[in-house]
Amino acid sequence: MDEYRELFICEHCKNPLIVGIINIVKDQAQCIAKCKKGHKKIIKLPMNDKLKWIDVLTEQIYHCRCGEELTDLKMSSSGGITNLVLYCKKHHERTRKIPTILWNAISSTRSKLLEESLVIQEDDLQEPSSIDTKSADSSVKVAQITPEQTVSTISIPENNDTNSSKPSFCPTCGEPLPEGATKFCPSCGMEL
């Protein structure tokens, strides 16, 4: 794959080449690419090696010449050509023309690349510690979340009595309710 990655570097200024138009001629995908300084190059990729270069090509399609990653705005297909309209924060709309036959592979590769970028390494996660809080009717586990974690978990009380007419905790503020509580939470005053 590194051999194909090198093809997408400008020979003149060493900036990345961004693909705007792709044509399939015989057994090759011919990509018209430009760097941010305007140097143009036609990159010829053998279709029988598609699995080796599809990731690199997809990355170069979804980047603007300024270096920003592009997001999808619109896509339309007509006459075997897929027209993409992508969005750059700095330069707004960017267009790409891709043969529909190749677009299917690029679309699935794009999904795979996005999933890979969202995967969090297991080493980066820490196990949250738990504290047991006991009340008269139930036991609740409260997870302590470290600032690096973005997902929190709430545990359901283990001994939940569904026949009770009053909840053991206020649904608004979460404070424990004393047995025989009135119609209002003694902590926040919310009607129960």
Image (cartoon, rainbow, N blue to C red):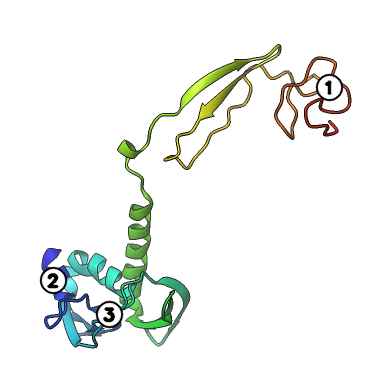
The amino acid type, in three-letter code, at marker 2 is Glu
Q: Position of residue 35 (x, y in %)?
A: 23, 82
In this picture, residue 19 sits left or right of residue 78: left
* 191 left or right of 114 in image: right
How packed mark 3 is, by other alpha carbons closer than 10 Å (few <14, some 14-19, many 20 or more), is: many
Note whether 79 is above or below 186 in the view shown. Answer: below
Instruction: Work out how far the residue at label 3 is from the one at label 1, CA to CA, in angstroms.
Output: 66 Å
Task: Specify which label sits upstream in the sequence, 2 or 1.
Answer: 2
Q: Position of residue 88 (x, y in %)?
A: 42, 75
| Element type at mark 2 | helix
| Secondary element at tag 3 | strand
- Disc 3 to disc 2, how far (Cα)? 14 Å
Describe residue 172's horizontal placement relative to residue 10 as left or right.
right
Residue, far right = 183
Residue drawn at point x = 27 percent, y = 80 percent: 19
Label located before the other in sequence (3 or 2): 2
Q: Which residue is mark 2?
A: 6
In the rendered image, the quadrant that contains the N terminus is bottom left
Q: Quadrant of residue 44?
A: bottom left
Q: Position of residue 47 (x, y in %)?
A: 19, 74
Residue identified by numbered label 3: 19
Q: Residue at x 81, y 27 (%)?
A: 185
Nearer to me, 166 or 102 = 166
According to the picture, the residue beneath numbered tag 1 turns out to be 165
Callout 2: few (<14), some (14-19), or many (20+) C-alpha neighbours within 10 Å? some
Secondary structure at badge 1 equals: loop
